[in-house]
């Protein structure tokens, strides 16, 4: 992805979150010089990969297959005592986050406002492929029986609990507008705990055609 595209997506995301009155922590707005001035006191942010995260999953087409995320809080296994994580995401209409599950992480996906979020689901089998067995999930504590490949639509205010080993892909329902999506989970490790059904690039290679407005979490190792 080009840095200019990432900057444009980032500005659009900031405007949408402001419209929905979702306020990020002050360090979200730091410039590169702010980071260099404060990095000594911000090691938890750097080490636990908090902050801006924009990916096209290697597709080359962010609005077809891509996701905007901001990790607000996150622990680090075997390092600190924080056992939980929280993210905010923005999902466009028909913008796919591909099929994947987590070996370790259990998560609630929450529609915080905007349109509707469609989630397609499979249980995984012993070979980590799609299972042909029906299964159950809970939305806000209510049990739903799901057939393999079935979909659940999460409307504003609703949430779904996804346990380990449940394949899921999601996208905004066409005609309903972009969706502000929350995630509350156990500790998140995007480097080792994403099992995509197909070969996917999780973090983009960035072409530096202009200066970053804000650093991505994946930028910390290169800029700080």
Image (cartoon, rainbow, N blue to C red):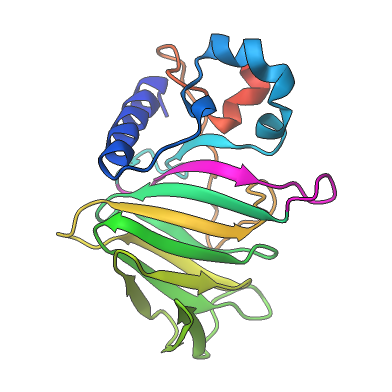
In screen coordinates, is 69 left or right of 20? right
Count of picture labels:
0
x and y percentages locating residue 104 in the rendered image: 70, 64
> Which quadrant holds residue 15?
top left
Query: Magenta includes 165?
Result: no
Instruction: Say if 130 sits above or below 6 in the image.
Output: below
Instruction: Say if 185 sits above or below 50 in the image.
Output: below
Depth order, front residue of 66/112: 112
The answer to whether residue 65 shows anywhere in this view is no
Residue shown at 64% from the left, 10% from the top? 37
In screen coordinates, is 124 left or right of 139? right
> Which quadrant holds residue 47?
top right
In screen coordinates, is 150 left or right of 45? left
Residue shown at 34% from the left, 33% from the top? 14
> Which quadrant holds residue 202?
top right
Residue shown at 19% from the left, 60% from the top? 174
x and y percentages locating residue 203 in the rendered image: 54, 38
Residue furthest out toward the right = 78
The answer to whether residue 203 shows anywhere in this view is yes
Give the residues in magenta. Answer: 64-82
Image quadrant holding the N terminus, namely top left
Depth order, front residue of 59/184: 184
x and y percentages locating residue 28 in the rendered image: 49, 28
């Amino acid at each position: 992805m080009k840095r200019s595209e990432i900057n444009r997506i980032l500005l659009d995301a900031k405007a949408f979150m402001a419209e929905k009155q979702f306020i990020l922590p002050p360090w979200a707005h730091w410039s590169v010089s702010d980071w260099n001035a404060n990095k000594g006191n911000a090691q938890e942010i750097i080490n636990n990969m908090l902050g801006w995260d924009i990916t096209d999953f290697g597709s080359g087409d962010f609005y077809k297959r891509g996701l905007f995320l901001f990790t607000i809080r996150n622990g680090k296994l075997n390092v600190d005592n924080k056992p939980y994580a929280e993210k905010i995401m923005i999902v466009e209409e028909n913008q796919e986050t591909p099929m994947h599950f987590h070996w370790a992480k259990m998560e609630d996906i929450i529609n915080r406002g905007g349109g509707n979020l469609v989630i397609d689901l499979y249980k995984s089998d012993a070979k980590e492929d799609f299972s042909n067995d029906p299964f159950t999930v809970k939305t806000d504590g209510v049990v739903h029986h799901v057939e393999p490949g079935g979909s659940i639509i999460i409307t504003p205010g609703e949430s779904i609990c996804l346990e380990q080993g449940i394949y899921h892909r999601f996208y905004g329902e066409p005609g309903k507008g972009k969706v502000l999506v929350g995630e509350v989970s156990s500790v998140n490790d995007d480097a080792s705990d994403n099992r995509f059904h197909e070969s996917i690039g999780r973090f983009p290679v960035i072409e530096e055609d202009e200066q970053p407005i804000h650093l991505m979490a994946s930028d910390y190792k290169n800029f700080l």
